[in-house]
Amino acid sequence: MPQAIFIHDANHYLHPLSLDLIDVADRDELAMYLRAPYPPDRFVETFATECGPFGRLDFWFSRWPGPEPRAVNRPATELFMYAAKLRPSTVPLLRGRIMVGSHDADGGLAGLTNEQIHAIVLHANGWRGPIRLEWRYAADAHAQRRRRKTSQRDRRPLRI
């Protein structure tokens, strides 16, 4: 059964204790871990890295159909930035629960190798995101607060 690393969105830092190794049989089970709405084919998406320090990695996540987006998953965003060799200003902010797996030559779901898992754990033990990525997290949180405040103002009853 393929193994994947589960990164919970409540963790704020990439640390070996925040990484859970989970057996995933198929995309439906993957959607269950991500808490994706039904049908999973419509709401489960992936970003793939072909070559990098960890080899082929797939970052599986679930789009959220609600009006307010999920919180940014900082550890997964930092790991994706490092694995895809992106800059802090260009990396997409990953939201919600994230599963990190791999894919085979046909594009199907495949498990991580022991070498990949070991490299990710060693990376998580010693690397911290740059300051510019922290700035993006703060700007995103500010935009979310502003959006919530605007939507609450629109819901208030009109007093005459």
Image: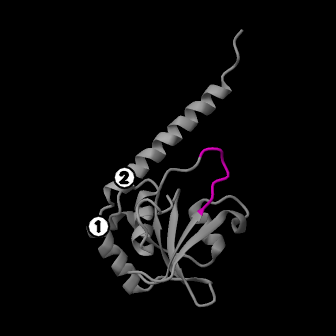
* Picture disc at residue 127: 1
Residue 131 against residue 16 in the figure, above or below: above
Which mark is in front, 2 or 1?
A: 2
Residue under the image location 62 percent in, 33 percent down: 151
Q: Residue at x 57, y 37 (%)?
A: 147
Magenta region's main secondary structure? loop
Residue 65, magenta (yes or no):
yes
| Residue 125 located left or right of residue 70 | left
Q: Magenta segment, which residues?
A: 62-68
For image coordinates 67% across by 52% down, the residue present is: 65
**Secondary structure beneath disc 1?**
loop
Q: Are marks 2 and 1 in contact (CB under 8 Å)?
A: no
Q: Residue furthest top?
A: 160
Give x and y (percent) for residue 154: 66, 27
Looking at the rendering, which quadrant does residue 108 occupy? bottom right
Label 2 – label 1 distance at C-alpha: 14 Å
- Quadrant holding the C terminus: top right
**Where does residue 90 sit, x and y in percent of width and height?**
47, 62
Q: Nearer the viewer, residue 36 or 107?
A: 107
Q: Is residue 13 magenta?
A: no
Q: Amino acid at mark 2?
A: Glu
Image mark count? 2
Residue 12 visible in this rendered orientation of the protein: no
**Residue pictured at 40% horizontal, 64% vertical:** 78
Give the labeled residue for mark 2: 134
Q: Please say if 144 is above or below 160.
A: below
